[in-house]
Amino acid sequence: MSARNPETRNPVPSKPGTGRPAGEAATDGALSRLGIRFTVWAERWFPDAFIFVAIAVVIVALGALANGAPAMTVAKSFGDGFWSLIPFTMQMAFVTIGGYVVATAPPVQRLIDRLALVPKTGRGAVGFVAAATMLSSFLSWGLSLIFGGLLARALARRTELRMDYRAAGAAAYLGLGATWAMGLSSSAAQLQANPKSLPPSLLPITGVIPFSETIFLWQSMLIALILFVISIVIAYVSAPQPATAVTADDLGLDVSRDKPDESRPQQPSEWLEHSPILTLLLVIIAGGWLYQEFARQSWITAISNLNTYNLLFLTLGLLLHWRPRNFLASVAKAVPATAGVLIQFPLYAAISAMLTNAKNAGGTSVSDVITHAFVALNTTGSFPISMGVYSAVLGFFVPSGGGKWLLEAPYVMQAANELQVHLGWAVMIYNAAEALPNLINPFWMLPLLGILGLKARDIVGFSFLQLIIHLPVVLFLLWALAFTLTYHPPVMP
């Protein structure tokens, strides 16, 4: 999980006078060379994720001041918003901890190790990681993040592959950057399908929109399939050949598998630490709550609740590790990976608060200004593209699928009603576009980066390559497929 010597990472040497990494072979295609160049640029110029979010805070604060909000109002919005996502911050930290605890349990490690035997080449390994993480993202974005990272680590242990660890890390991120919002854990689709989850003020505008009108539309599944195929092809083709690949070992990273503690208790006080008795009792108690959660609702709805998801993974991890001592050792190794989450998520919450709560004397916020411009400039034909671009740009500053939907939905869905755009398709426009900025936004990268032992700058070159290809494809499909759907007024529960 951590670098053997993080302060002296091995640099990628360059050919004199070319700026190309040493050993860059003619067999590397154009996309591979472009991905390498983006990565070299990012390694030099892309700031640490904390610097990135700090700059964003300053920009949004200046925007609020320029809009006429008093300085003290901006400061109050920052402070009030800073702590508003603490429950979500802890949930995200436990996504990392729970996923890591399960994935490092001996039975799961054996499964991941077997999967890691499938690829025969380094580039094939990168494509395999991309496929695995996107498939798992259709079920759960949290699962894809952890599973993809640990699969990349397992493949990195096969040193004979000469797999580029940076490209594999970017591939492990594709579930969050390409497909998650088109799957079962789509926050916006989940909110719209469950009327009790929607604010009372939003329900009359949108009505209840079931999955059959969002993620299970054939148009939605077509976009998901196209993105799945394109992403794998880009990941494979852009991955450097063995001669130019930068492996985990080249980066000075330790990707060895954690070994369970097989020692025996030496003191009476250690007996319970090594005994599975408490493990079984805790699993029974937690299992009783989980049973009730899954019994009272569909499993899709249950697993999409982060509290349920996290407790399920922690309980499963406890059971798979069997002995409390091994479970606690795994948790201790997972905690450092949450450092970025704990310090940066509150800053993103503050950004969201300044966008919406820092208002001028007329009661107008930066978000309101954007809203009025959005509605005034749209037509039925331009709606899919303009909403897609808007959702992608706003998602870069407010990276929260569900929370941002509650901010955006009141005006974009009202515009959809006025312009008679299919309401379920408006949700999917949001979903497909909202995922795009994830490809270069360090916000969601943090749990994965902690597992991989990498920095955002290490993988963003390859993920940016995905973005510049995804963007026109997604916008075109959102626009073209909109003409195959017919508007229906909101359906109330």
Image: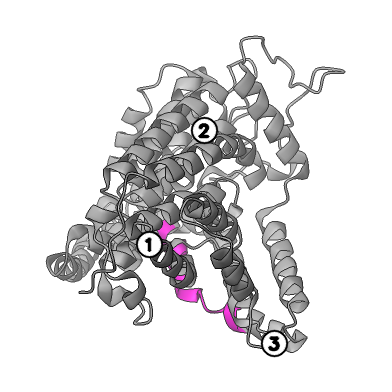
User: Which one is earlier in the sequence, the residue at label 3 or at label 1?
Assistant: 3
Question: Looking at the picture, how far across and down is residue 9, in whole percent?
Answer: 71, 37
Residue 114: % across, % down: 32, 29
Answer whether residue 100 is magenta in the image.
no
Q: Which residue is mark 2?
A: 168
Mark 3 near mark 1, Cβ–Cβ under 8 Å? Answer: no
| Mark carried by residue 188 | 1
* Amino acid type assigned to the residue bearing label 2 in the image: Ala
Start and end of the magenta stretch? 80-95
SS class of the residue under badge 1? helix
Residue 195 sits above or below residue 185 on the image: below
Q: Residue at 35%, 65% (x, y): give it.
A: 306
Q: Answer with left or right where residue 304 lies relative to residue 455.
A: left
Task: Identify the residue under disc 3.
Answer: 73
In the image, residue 122 sits, relative to residue 42, either above or below, namely above
Mark found first going from the N terminus, 1 or 2: 2
Mark 3: amino acid: Thr
| Circles 1 and 2 in contact, beta carbons < 8 Å | no
